[in-house]
Amino acid sequence: MNGTPNPVICIATSALILSMGKFRNKFTGLFRCLTRRSSRRSSVNSSRSRTPEPLSRPQSSVPQSVSSSQGPPPADTPKGSVSIIPPKSIQGAMSTTDTDTARASVEPELAIEHVLCAQCQNSVTKSLILQSQKPSRGTEDFSQYISRAALEASAFGSTSTGTSAVACHLCSLILGKVQQHDNQQSVAETVPIHVALKVSRSGGVTLAIQSLEDARPRWLGELSVLSHADLEGSNASSDGNRGGKFSFPSQSSRTYQNAQLAKSLASEASFPLAREWLKQCLQKHPNCTEAARLATGRPTRLIDVGNDTGIDPRVVHMEYRNKSSELEYLTLSHCWGGATILRLLTDNIDSLAAGIPMSTLPKTFQDAIIITRNLGYRYIWIDSLCIIQDSLSDWRGCSASMGEIYGGSVCTIAALTARNSHDGGCFFDHARHPLFFRPCQITAGYWVEGNTNIATDLRTGLLPMPLHTRAWVVQERILAPRTLYYGSNGLAWECVECSATEAVPAGELSRFSPKTLFFGQWQLNNPNQYYDDWTGIQAAYTLCLLTKFEDRLVAISGVIKRLETLTGWKNSWGMWHERLLLDLLWFVESPSTRPKTKEYLAPTWSWLGVEGRIMTVLNTQEAASQWMAEIIDVGTQEDGQGYLKLRAMSRRVTVTTEGALNPGIERHAPKWEEVDWDRDEMDDVGNEICCILIVRIPDYLAHGGPAFDIGLVVSRKHAIGENWVRIGVFRQLREGNSLFPDDIVNAIDINIV
């Protein structure tokens, strides 16, 4: 069984590949559902905007050459500090005083590119490889830092005396590579860092970075050294328009250039890019407009952020005069993380409606309000402030429509890196370093490529961002037509039509975007594809975390309702009636538990009640097999619990001490007749156990080969009367003795609860 990488699954981004001993499953095109294209275009209401036009800021010129000989650092350089030396094109006829004045005049919100520290400049000057037009294969020492802390000091422009200097661009790129390696194994502050310059057999030049812990080198990564012509073709090029969904005319190029160099996402240099993405999407992306139009629910309450920073935000109750009433609002996607935060309660509604002092809000909420104002909008929906947290009826009503609230918003602000509402917020002060991802010119002919392997969700490794480990966020990300991500590394955009980052501001179609995949196949009207995409969403969702397990259904109900609208199917307890035999054949990745909940959650034949990652045995292509069971009825008993009546063949089995299923009842049958199975949970399964045959796949391994039987394993344990409970799924390759005959004989009705 194999699978494809799941874009929403925040934890495991690698492909699901299971051995032949397991079930086969092809998660093809995860999250691809249907979207109908519309010609309707909406535009930004310019009269609503209260934010300034994109800034035009002075920048230092990009050097065309770098001085090959630099003198020693100034005499007043503190001992142990690294002196920053501007490239030759910046120095020109500057005296030391002129240089200091130039540095002071550079916009403080923007990082300065292509500036090297004395150590890096000296290494460049001495390098034989960099001075050669056609370097020969080989390796030479480039530079060494006495510790990671020394590298960080140079990269961030700090000195031993605590004074600040201009950051070294090349040191920043090296540190960026070290930080990417931290995702696998962190490098201590005291460990020396060594950098070598290498020329490969093919002539490629790289900076190889190693740590020297206990005098043993450990590879941390490498940076490509490119000619200007080679750099032009990379996504680090300064073009910003190549084949993308967003366009940046040359006269407004600073919109993204300033954003790329902004030292903080809270600075005025960063906001114009976010505004431009949103404006162009609203004006030019019909699929995003159509995706938003599918949403039918509207929020009961919103946060009015006011017209300027001098006004306190407040909770407002929304009254809609008619069904067509529309109100533009944003939404916030964030991690609660168990933090104590201000919440809307029955006894503080009036006070929060009068005004909420910004100082009482957690940092993530404060940042989201600032972003809302800067994007030119007045209202934002934040769950903890717009749902009465101590009112069960209000929570049930609002949470059931939460997917529609995100779907109907103009844009969702996502606090990607914050683990809770107080941890860093959206802006993550002092964490961002824009030079990590910008190419650096080190000589007239050579550039060092930026750390461009940064995903749309701003990951720099395989580990997910904190926000994408939260189960509620799965539907928030899928159904919101537009999402603006704020992470510690930078700013990113995701909408139905494309994804973009500061490094690729023009955007590109992403095959890992759940929005694109969920809506992108709508016009094809392919029900089988709907179902296969649902199984991908199911696997992604069940891998994420829930604070309260009883939210297992409601936290994904928005996606279920949207699929019901698109397909006309009916869903009960997370199971699709129109694909119920196929849907029954789920399994949990590792035997888990059925957590106790205050209220009834789901029958045992539904995946909802089992903790852990859920995957399916078959996809719809394999389901064109021989069905060996029939659904007689599915519904709800008088006690409110779900039931399923099947007509199928069954076979009594026992569980061996090794955990296999043995068809011998009075005494064990031979070992070669035992059957493998996947248990739902590790609990005791009871004494009365049956296998129920659901499907037979002919020619499983090859044409003319043996068939493969798959079905449910049920037990009498915990069941009442003649009912059974599900405890797992079995599979058996039909070689030699098999549990079931070739044809359906002696089928019986079986009730599973």
Image (cartoon, rainbow, N blue to C red):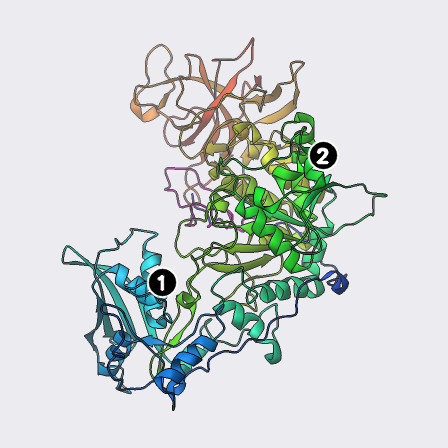
Could you tell me residue 578's position as x and y percent? 65, 35
Residue 520 in view here:
no
Q: Which residues are magenta?
A: 5-32
Query: Residue reaching furthest bottom?
Result: 93
Amino acid found under the numbered disc labelled 1: Gly
Q: Is residue 385 left or right of residue 503?
A: right
Residue 129 versus residue 650 in the image, above or below: below
**Magenta run includes residue 22:** yes
Residue 172 sits in which quadrant?
Answer: bottom left
**Residue hosting label 2:** 350
Could you tell me residue 638's position as x and y percent? 67, 14
Mark seen at residue 553:
none
- Residue drawn at (54%, 18%), measured in percent from left and top? 746
- Residue drawn at (51%, 18%), measured in percent from left and top? 725
The N terminus, quarter of image: top left
Instruction: Tell me the distance, in whole angstroms, between the alpha carbons under discs 1 and 2.
Output: 48 Å
Q: Secondary structure at mark 2?
A: helix
**Magenta run includes residue 417:** no
> If you read the primary sequence from the N terminus, does the residue marked by circle 1 or circle 2 appear first?
1
- Residue drawn at (36%, 62%), measured in percent from left and top? 176
Residue 75 sits in which quadrant?
Answer: bottom left
Mark seen at residue 176:
1
Query: Residue reaching furthest right?
Result: 321
Residue 690 versus residue 56 in the image, above or below: above
Residue 147 sits in which quadrant?
Answer: bottom left
Could you tell me residue 184's position as x and y percent? 32, 51
Q: Is residue 356 left or right of residue 58?
A: right
- Residue drawn at (31%, 60%), measured in percent from left and top? 178
